[in-house]
Image: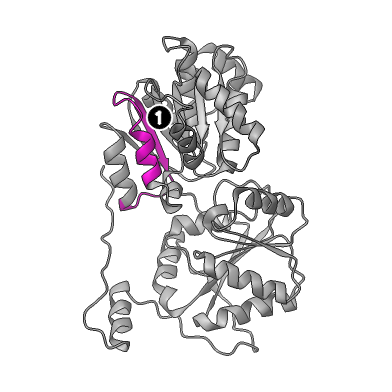
Protein backbone atom coordinates (compact mmCIF):
# COMPACT_ATOMS: atom_id res chain seq x y z
CA UNK A 1 0.00 0.00 0.00
CA UNK A 2 1.35 3.45 -0.88
CA UNK A 3 1.19 6.60 1.25
CA UNK A 4 -0.87 8.30 -1.47
CA UNK A 5 -3.65 5.73 -0.90
CA UNK A 6 -4.23 7.15 2.59
CA UNK A 7 -5.74 10.53 3.32
CA UNK A 8 -2.53 12.08 4.64
CA UNK A 9 -2.56 15.70 3.52
CA UNK A 10 -0.62 17.06 0.55
CA UNK A 11 2.11 18.75 2.61
CA UNK A 12 3.00 15.42 4.25
CA UNK A 13 2.87 13.59 0.92
CA UNK A 14 5.19 16.19 -0.64
CA UNK A 15 7.75 15.64 2.12
CA UNK A 16 7.51 11.86 1.67
CA UNK A 17 8.02 12.29 -2.08
CA UNK A 18 11.18 14.32 -1.46
CA UNK A 19 12.44 11.62 0.91
CA UNK A 20 11.65 8.87 -1.66
CA UNK A 21 9.15 7.20 0.67
CA UNK A 22 6.48 5.42 -1.38
CA UNK A 23 5.45 2.03 0.02
CA UNK A 24 4.32 1.75 3.63
CA UNK A 25 5.76 -0.84 5.98
CA UNK A 26 3.27 -3.27 7.59
CA UNK A 27 3.13 -1.31 10.86
CA UNK A 28 2.48 1.93 8.94
CA UNK A 29 -0.17 0.34 6.75
CA UNK A 30 -2.09 -0.88 9.78
CA UNK A 31 -1.60 2.10 12.12
CA UNK A 32 -1.84 5.22 9.94
CA UNK A 33 -5.51 4.76 8.91
CA UNK A 34 -6.53 3.91 12.50
CA UNK A 35 -4.80 6.98 13.93
CA UNK A 36 -6.30 9.19 11.21
CA UNK A 37 -9.70 7.80 12.21
CA UNK A 38 -8.88 8.96 15.76
CA UNK A 39 -8.69 5.54 17.41
CA UNK A 40 -6.36 4.81 20.30
CA UNK A 41 -3.71 2.35 19.08
CA UNK A 42 -1.56 -0.23 20.88
CA UNK A 43 1.27 -1.21 18.55
CA UNK A 44 3.66 -4.08 19.21
CA UNK A 45 6.62 -3.85 16.86
CA UNK A 46 10.38 -3.96 17.08
CA UNK A 47 12.80 -1.20 16.19
CA UNK A 48 13.38 -0.82 12.47
CA UNK A 49 9.79 -1.50 11.37
CA UNK A 50 8.96 2.15 10.68
CA UNK A 51 6.87 2.80 13.78
CA UNK A 52 8.06 6.41 14.20
CA UNK A 53 6.49 7.33 10.86
CA UNK A 54 3.45 5.20 11.76
CA UNK A 55 2.42 7.71 14.42
CA UNK A 56 4.18 10.93 13.34
CA UNK A 57 2.73 11.10 9.83
CA UNK A 58 -0.98 10.92 10.75
CA UNK A 59 -0.59 13.21 13.76
CA UNK A 60 1.33 15.84 11.78
CA UNK A 61 -1.22 15.60 8.97
CA UNK A 62 -4.11 16.24 11.37
CA UNK A 63 -2.29 19.12 13.08
CA UNK A 64 -1.54 20.72 9.71
CA UNK A 65 -5.18 20.39 8.65
CA UNK A 66 -6.00 22.76 11.51
CA UNK A 67 -8.62 22.99 14.22
CA UNK A 68 -6.14 22.87 17.12
CA UNK A 69 -5.20 25.80 19.39
CA UNK A 70 -2.18 27.86 18.28
CA UNK A 71 -0.98 28.63 21.80
CA UNK A 72 -1.12 25.09 23.24
CA UNK A 73 0.93 21.90 23.26
CA UNK A 74 -1.14 19.68 20.98
CA UNK A 75 0.99 16.52 20.87
CA UNK A 76 3.22 14.99 23.55
CA UNK A 77 5.61 12.18 22.57
CA UNK A 78 7.41 10.36 25.37
CA UNK A 79 10.69 8.50 24.71
CA UNK A 80 12.86 6.54 27.19
CA UNK A 81 16.24 8.01 26.21
CA UNK A 82 17.79 11.16 24.88
CA UNK A 83 19.06 9.20 21.87
CA UNK A 84 15.56 8.11 20.83
CA UNK A 85 14.13 11.58 21.46
CA UNK A 86 16.77 12.99 19.11
CA UNK A 87 15.94 10.41 16.44
CA UNK A 88 12.22 11.23 16.66
CA UNK A 89 13.03 14.93 16.46
CA UNK A 90 15.12 14.35 13.32
CA UNK A 91 12.25 12.41 11.74
CA UNK A 92 9.90 15.24 12.71
CA UNK A 93 12.08 17.75 10.86
CA UNK A 94 11.98 15.66 7.69
CA UNK A 95 8.28 14.78 7.71
CA UNK A 96 7.30 18.30 8.73
CA UNK A 97 9.43 20.14 6.16
CA UNK A 98 6.41 21.73 4.44
CA UNK A 99 4.38 22.33 7.61
CA UNK A 100 4.76 26.06 8.20
CA UNK A 101 2.38 26.28 11.14
CA UNK A 102 3.43 23.15 13.10
CA UNK A 103 6.24 23.79 15.60
CA UNK A 104 8.14 21.29 17.74
CA UNK A 105 10.70 21.04 20.53
CA UNK A 106 12.75 18.14 21.90
CA UNK A 107 13.10 18.08 25.68
CA UNK A 108 15.75 15.87 27.29
CA UNK A 109 18.38 15.89 30.01
CA UNK A 110 22.14 16.18 29.92
CA UNK A 111 22.23 19.71 28.50
CA UNK A 112 23.61 23.03 29.64
CA UNK A 113 21.59 25.96 30.95
CA UNK A 114 21.14 27.53 27.51
CA UNK A 115 19.38 24.43 26.22
CA UNK A 116 17.11 24.36 29.27
CA UNK A 117 16.16 28.01 28.69
CA UNK A 118 15.32 27.26 25.05
CA UNK A 119 13.12 24.36 26.13
CA UNK A 120 11.42 26.59 28.69
CA UNK A 121 10.58 29.27 26.11
CA UNK A 122 9.23 26.75 23.59
CA UNK A 123 7.10 24.98 26.20
CA UNK A 124 5.59 28.20 27.53
CA UNK A 125 4.77 29.43 24.02
CA UNK A 126 2.98 26.15 23.28
CA UNK A 127 5.02 24.20 20.74
CA UNK A 128 2.63 21.99 18.77
CA UNK A 129 4.72 18.84 19.24
CA UNK A 130 6.83 18.12 22.32
CA UNK A 131 9.21 15.15 22.23
CA UNK A 132 10.44 14.45 25.75
CA UNK A 133 12.12 12.06 28.14
CA UNK A 134 10.11 11.54 31.35
CA UNK A 135 12.59 12.97 33.87
CA UNK A 136 13.28 16.17 31.98
CA UNK A 137 9.60 16.84 31.28
CA UNK A 138 8.73 16.34 34.94
CA UNK A 139 11.35 18.89 35.95
CA UNK A 140 9.63 21.44 33.68
CA UNK A 141 6.19 20.49 35.01
CA UNK A 142 7.29 20.94 38.64
CA UNK A 143 8.43 24.54 38.06
CA UNK A 144 5.36 25.45 36.00
CA UNK A 145 7.00 25.68 32.57
CA UNK A 146 4.47 23.50 30.80
CA UNK A 147 0.69 23.28 30.46
CA UNK A 148 -0.54 19.89 29.22
CA UNK A 149 -4.23 20.52 29.76
CA UNK A 150 -5.04 20.86 26.03
CA UNK A 151 -2.96 18.02 24.61
CA UNK A 152 -4.86 16.18 21.86
CA UNK A 153 -2.31 13.42 21.08
CA UNK A 154 -0.26 11.44 23.59
CA UNK A 155 2.36 8.98 22.30
CA UNK A 156 4.40 6.51 24.37
CA UNK A 157 7.27 5.18 22.24
CA UNK A 158 9.18 2.09 23.41
CA UNK A 159 6.94 1.85 26.47
CA UNK A 160 8.55 -1.40 27.63
CA UNK A 161 11.95 0.27 27.82
CA UNK A 162 10.50 3.14 29.83
CA UNK A 163 9.11 0.72 32.39
CA UNK A 164 12.35 -1.29 32.45
CA UNK A 165 14.23 1.94 33.19
CA UNK A 166 11.95 2.71 36.15
CA UNK A 167 9.81 5.45 34.60
CA UNK A 168 6.42 3.94 35.47
CA UNK A 169 5.60 6.44 38.24
CA UNK A 170 6.88 9.34 36.11
CA UNK A 171 4.63 8.34 33.21
CA UNK A 172 1.58 8.10 35.47
CA UNK A 173 2.39 11.49 36.98
CA UNK A 174 2.73 13.08 33.54
CA UNK A 175 -0.49 11.43 32.35
CA UNK A 176 -2.36 12.94 35.30
CA UNK A 177 -1.80 16.39 33.75
CA UNK A 178 -3.37 15.37 30.42
CA UNK A 179 -7.04 15.71 29.42
CA UNK A 180 -9.04 12.47 29.47
CA UNK A 181 -10.41 12.98 25.95
CA UNK A 182 -6.96 12.84 24.29
CA UNK A 183 -6.04 10.29 21.61
CA UNK A 184 -3.33 7.92 22.87
CA UNK A 185 -0.89 5.79 20.89
CA UNK A 186 1.47 3.34 22.58
CA UNK A 187 4.28 1.34 21.01
CA UNK A 188 6.22 -1.48 22.63
CA UNK A 189 8.59 -4.13 21.31
CA UNK A 190 7.20 -6.69 23.75
CA UNK A 191 3.88 -7.15 25.54
CA UNK A 192 4.55 -8.34 29.11
CA UNK A 193 1.93 -8.04 31.84
CA UNK A 194 3.17 -4.65 33.03
CA UNK A 195 2.66 -3.20 29.53
CA UNK A 196 -0.84 -4.69 29.40
CA UNK A 197 -1.66 -2.97 32.68
CA UNK A 198 -0.25 0.34 31.46
CA UNK A 199 -2.27 0.06 28.25
CA UNK A 200 -5.47 -0.60 30.21
CA UNK A 201 -4.91 2.53 32.29
CA UNK A 202 -3.91 4.79 29.39
CA UNK A 203 -5.87 3.72 26.30
CA UNK A 204 -9.60 3.78 25.52
CA UNK A 205 -10.86 0.81 23.45
CA UNK A 206 -7.54 0.62 21.57
CA UNK A 207 -6.97 -1.03 18.23
CA UNK A 208 -4.29 -3.70 18.70
CA UNK A 209 -1.65 -3.89 15.96
CA UNK A 210 0.99 -6.56 16.37
CA UNK A 211 3.79 -7.10 13.86
CA UNK A 212 5.67 -10.38 14.18
CA UNK A 213 9.28 -10.04 15.30
CA UNK A 214 11.63 -10.47 12.35
CA UNK A 215 14.17 -13.24 12.42
CA UNK A 216 17.81 -12.15 12.73
CA UNK A 217 19.67 -11.43 9.51
CA UNK A 218 20.96 -14.58 7.81
CA UNK A 219 24.42 -13.00 7.63
CA UNK A 220 24.78 -13.21 11.42
CA UNK A 221 26.89 -16.22 12.40
CA UNK A 222 25.24 -17.36 15.64
CA UNK A 223 26.84 -19.70 18.17
CA UNK A 224 26.86 -20.42 21.90
CA UNK A 225 29.04 -21.68 24.71
CA UNK A 226 27.25 -24.02 27.12
CA UNK A 227 29.05 -23.24 30.36
CA UNK A 228 28.88 -22.82 34.10
CA UNK A 229 28.34 -19.27 35.31
CA UNK A 230 31.82 -19.13 36.82
CA UNK A 231 33.37 -20.01 33.44
CA UNK A 232 32.04 -16.96 31.58
CA UNK A 233 34.92 -14.67 32.52
CA UNK A 234 37.36 -17.35 31.33
CA UNK A 235 35.64 -17.52 27.93
CA UNK A 236 35.86 -13.74 27.62
CA UNK A 237 39.60 -13.93 28.33
CA UNK A 238 40.00 -16.69 25.74
CA UNK A 239 38.12 -14.78 23.02
CA UNK A 240 40.15 -11.64 23.47
CA UNK A 241 43.46 -13.42 23.96
CA UNK A 242 43.14 -15.42 20.72
CA UNK A 243 41.57 -12.74 18.50
CA UNK A 244 42.17 -9.09 17.72
CA UNK A 245 38.56 -8.12 18.40
CA UNK A 246 37.26 -4.67 17.50
CA UNK A 247 33.80 -3.14 17.08
CA UNK A 248 32.31 -5.47 19.71
CA UNK A 249 29.31 -5.02 22.02
CA UNK A 250 29.05 -7.25 25.10
CA UNK A 251 25.54 -7.30 26.57
CA UNK A 252 24.51 -8.21 30.10
CA UNK A 253 21.10 -7.78 31.68
CA UNK A 254 22.60 -6.53 34.97
CA UNK A 255 24.67 -3.40 35.44
CA UNK A 256 26.79 -5.01 38.17
CA UNK A 257 27.91 -7.65 35.67
CA UNK A 258 28.64 -4.93 33.13
CA UNK A 259 30.93 -3.28 35.66
CA UNK A 260 32.68 -6.59 36.42
CA UNK A 261 33.24 -7.37 32.73
CA UNK A 262 34.50 -3.85 32.11
CA UNK A 263 37.03 -4.11 34.97
CA UNK A 264 38.28 -7.48 33.66
CA UNK A 265 38.72 -6.11 30.13
CA UNK A 266 40.57 -3.06 31.43
CA UNK A 267 42.84 -5.41 33.38
CA UNK A 268 43.53 -7.18 30.07
CA UNK A 269 44.47 -3.81 28.48
CA UNK A 270 41.43 -3.92 26.16
CA UNK A 271 40.30 -0.54 24.81
CA UNK A 272 36.76 -0.61 26.20
CA UNK A 273 33.96 1.47 27.72
CA UNK A 274 30.87 0.70 29.77
CA UNK A 275 27.25 1.80 29.38
CA UNK A 276 24.59 1.43 32.08
CA UNK A 277 22.03 3.42 34.03
CA UNK A 278 24.47 4.53 36.76
CA UNK A 279 26.18 6.84 34.27
CA UNK A 280 24.94 10.39 33.83
CA UNK A 281 23.38 11.37 30.52
CA UNK A 282 26.49 13.35 29.63
CA UNK A 283 28.73 10.34 30.37
CA UNK A 284 26.51 8.09 28.24
CA UNK A 285 26.63 10.57 25.35
CA UNK A 286 30.42 10.72 25.54
CA UNK A 287 30.70 6.91 25.57
CA UNK A 288 28.44 6.54 22.53
CA UNK A 289 30.27 9.25 20.59
CA UNK A 290 33.62 7.60 21.33
CA UNK A 291 32.33 4.18 20.31
CA UNK A 292 30.71 5.44 17.11
CA UNK A 293 33.90 7.27 16.21
CA UNK A 294 35.98 4.11 16.62
CA UNK A 295 37.91 5.50 19.58
CA UNK A 296 36.67 2.56 21.69
CA UNK A 297 36.96 -1.05 20.47
CA UNK A 298 34.58 -2.78 22.89
CA UNK A 299 31.38 -1.52 24.51
CA UNK A 300 30.08 -3.39 27.56
CA UNK A 301 26.41 -2.50 28.05
CA UNK A 302 23.06 -3.31 29.51
CA UNK A 303 20.06 -3.45 27.18
CA UNK A 304 19.99 0.34 27.25
CA UNK A 305 21.71 0.22 23.81
CA UNK A 306 20.08 -2.91 22.36
CA UNK A 307 17.43 -0.89 20.52
CA UNK A 308 17.37 2.21 18.44
CA UNK A 309 21.11 2.84 18.15
CA UNK A 310 22.28 3.13 14.54
CA UNK A 311 25.87 1.91 14.29
CA UNK A 312 26.47 0.02 11.07
CA UNK A 313 29.93 -1.50 11.58
CA UNK A 314 29.51 -3.70 14.67
CA UNK A 315 31.36 -6.94 13.93
CA UNK A 316 30.46 -9.00 16.98
CA UNK A 317 27.83 -9.15 19.70
CA UNK A 318 28.47 -11.22 22.82
CA UNK A 319 25.53 -12.08 25.07
CA UNK A 320 27.21 -12.55 28.44
CA UNK A 321 23.87 -13.82 29.68
CA UNK A 322 20.79 -15.12 27.88
CA UNK A 323 18.14 -12.45 27.21
CA UNK A 324 14.75 -12.89 28.87
CA UNK A 325 12.90 -13.58 25.63
CA UNK A 326 13.41 -14.06 21.91
CA UNK A 327 12.57 -10.44 21.09
CA UNK A 328 15.37 -9.18 23.32
CA UNK A 329 17.75 -11.67 21.71
CA UNK A 330 16.84 -10.42 18.25
CA UNK A 331 17.29 -6.79 19.33
CA UNK A 332 20.72 -7.51 20.82
CA UNK A 333 22.25 -9.46 17.96
CA UNK A 334 20.60 -7.15 15.44
CA UNK A 335 23.28 -4.58 16.28
CA UNK A 336 25.64 -6.56 14.00
CA UNK A 337 25.49 -7.57 10.30
CA UNK A 338 23.93 -4.26 9.31
CA UNK A 339 24.28 -2.45 5.97
CA UNK A 340 25.05 -5.72 4.15
CA UNK A 341 28.00 -6.52 6.42
CA UNK A 342 28.74 -9.88 8.04
CA UNK A 343 28.48 -10.29 11.79
CA UNK A 344 29.03 -12.71 14.65
CA UNK A 345 26.80 -13.30 17.69
CA UNK A 346 27.99 -15.46 20.59
CA UNK A 347 25.88 -16.30 23.64
CA UNK A 348 27.08 -17.68 26.97
CA UNK A 349 24.50 -20.14 28.33
CA UNK A 350 24.75 -21.25 31.96
CA UNK A 351 22.82 -24.18 33.47
CA UNK A 352 20.06 -21.89 34.75
CA UNK A 353 19.73 -20.23 31.34
CA UNK A 354 19.40 -23.36 29.20
CA UNK A 355 15.61 -23.39 29.15
CA UNK A 356 15.41 -19.72 28.09
CA UNK A 357 17.99 -20.35 25.38
CA UNK A 358 16.03 -23.33 24.09
CA UNK A 359 12.95 -21.10 23.77
CA UNK A 360 15.02 -18.73 21.64
CA UNK A 361 16.07 -21.64 19.42
CA UNK A 362 12.42 -22.65 19.03
CA UNK A 363 11.53 -19.11 18.02
CA UNK A 364 14.34 -19.08 15.45
CA UNK A 365 13.27 -22.49 14.17
CA UNK A 366 16.77 -23.90 14.33
CA UNK A 367 19.47 -25.07 16.73
CA UNK A 368 22.28 -22.62 17.31
CA UNK A 369 25.81 -24.01 16.90
CA UNK A 370 27.42 -25.00 20.20
CA UNK A 371 31.11 -24.14 20.42
CA UNK A 372 33.70 -26.39 22.07
CA UNK A 373 34.81 -25.00 25.39
CA UNK A 374 38.35 -23.54 25.45
CA UNK A 375 40.97 -25.83 27.03
CA UNK A 376 41.91 -23.06 29.45
CA UNK A 377 38.37 -23.02 30.88
CA UNK A 378 37.57 -26.72 31.22
CA UNK A 379 34.47 -28.70 30.36
CA UNK A 380 31.01 -27.20 30.64
CA UNK A 381 27.69 -28.84 31.49
CA UNK A 382 25.67 -30.90 29.02
CA UNK A 383 23.02 -29.00 27.08
CA UNK A 384 19.87 -30.49 28.60
CA UNK A 385 17.21 -27.75 28.75
CA UNK A 386 14.62 -28.43 31.43
CA UNK A 387 11.42 -26.59 32.17
CA UNK A 388 11.53 -23.52 34.39
CA UNK A 389 9.37 -25.32 36.95
CA UNK A 390 11.66 -28.33 37.10
CA UNK A 391 14.72 -26.15 37.42
CA UNK A 392 13.14 -24.02 40.15
CA UNK A 393 12.23 -27.14 42.12
CA UNK A 394 15.78 -28.46 41.88
CA UNK A 395 17.18 -25.05 42.76
CA UNK A 396 15.11 -24.81 45.94
CA UNK A 397 15.78 -28.42 46.93
CA UNK A 398 19.52 -27.86 46.79
CA UNK A 399 19.15 -25.05 49.30
CA UNK A 400 16.86 -26.97 51.61
CA UNK A 401 13.82 -24.86 50.84
CA UNK A 402 10.40 -26.35 50.38
CA UNK A 403 8.14 -25.47 47.49
CA UNK A 404 8.80 -23.68 44.24
CA UNK A 405 9.56 -20.10 43.53
CA UNK A 406 6.67 -18.09 42.14
CA UNK A 407 6.21 -18.34 38.40
CA UNK A 408 4.74 -15.57 36.31
CA UNK A 409 1.89 -16.59 34.04
CA UNK A 410 2.28 -16.38 30.28
CA UNK A 411 0.47 -13.69 28.32
CA UNK A 412 -1.96 -14.77 25.64
CA UNK A 413 -2.60 -12.16 23.02
CA UNK A 414 -6.22 -11.16 22.63
CA UNK A 415 -7.34 -11.51 19.07
- Residue that protrudes farthest toward the left in the picture: 403
**Residue 196 in the image, given as x and y percentages of width and height:** 30, 46
Secondary structure state at the residue bearing disc 1: strand
**Residue 304 in the image, given as x and y percentages of width and height:** 54, 54
Q: Nearer the viewer, residue 116 or 302?
A: 116
Q: Is residue 49 above or below residue 394?
A: above
Q: Is residue 17 above or below residue 373?
A: above
Task: Judge from the rendering whether residue 233 lies leftward or rightward of residue 45; answer left or right.
Answer: right
Magenta region: which residues?
A: 169-193
Where residue 219 sits, quadrant-wise, is bottom right
Identify the residue shown where x is 54% and y is 16%: 102
Q: Nearer the viewer, residue 8 or 281?
A: 281
Q: Quadrant of the C terminus?
A: top left
Q: Nearer the viewer, residue 264 or 26?
A: 264
Q: Tell me, yes or no, if residue 71 can be seen here.
A: yes
Q: Nearer the viewer, residue 291 or 347?
A: 291
**Residue 235 in the image, given as x and y percentages of width and height:** 62, 79
Where residue 231 sits, quadrant-wise, is bottom right
Tag 1 residue: 154
Identify the residue shown where x is 33% and y is 82%: 395
Identify the residue shown where x is 65% and y is 20%: 18
**Residue 297 in the image, given as x and y percentages of width and height:** 74, 62
Number of labelled discs?
Answer: 1
- Residue that protrudes farthest toward the front in the picture: 143
Task: Judge from the rendering whether residue 194 lies leftward or rightward of residue 68; answer left or right.
Answer: left
Where residue 414 sits, quadrant-wise, is top left
Q: Is residue 177 magenta?
A: yes
Identify the residue shown where x is 54% and y is 60%: 302
Q: Is residue 235 magenta?
A: no
Amino acid sequence: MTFEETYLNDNILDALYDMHFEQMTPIQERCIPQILDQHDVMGVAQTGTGKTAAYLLPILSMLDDGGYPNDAINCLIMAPTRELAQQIDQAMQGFGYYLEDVSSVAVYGGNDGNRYDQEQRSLRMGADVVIATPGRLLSHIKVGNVDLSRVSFFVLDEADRMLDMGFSDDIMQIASHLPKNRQTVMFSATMPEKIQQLAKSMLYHPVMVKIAVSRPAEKIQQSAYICYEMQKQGIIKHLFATNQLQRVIIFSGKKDKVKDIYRELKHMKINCAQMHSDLTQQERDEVMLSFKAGQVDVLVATDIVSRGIDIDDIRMVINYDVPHDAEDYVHRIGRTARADRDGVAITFVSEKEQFAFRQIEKFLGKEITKNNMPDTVGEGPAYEPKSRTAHASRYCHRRGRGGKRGQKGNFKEKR
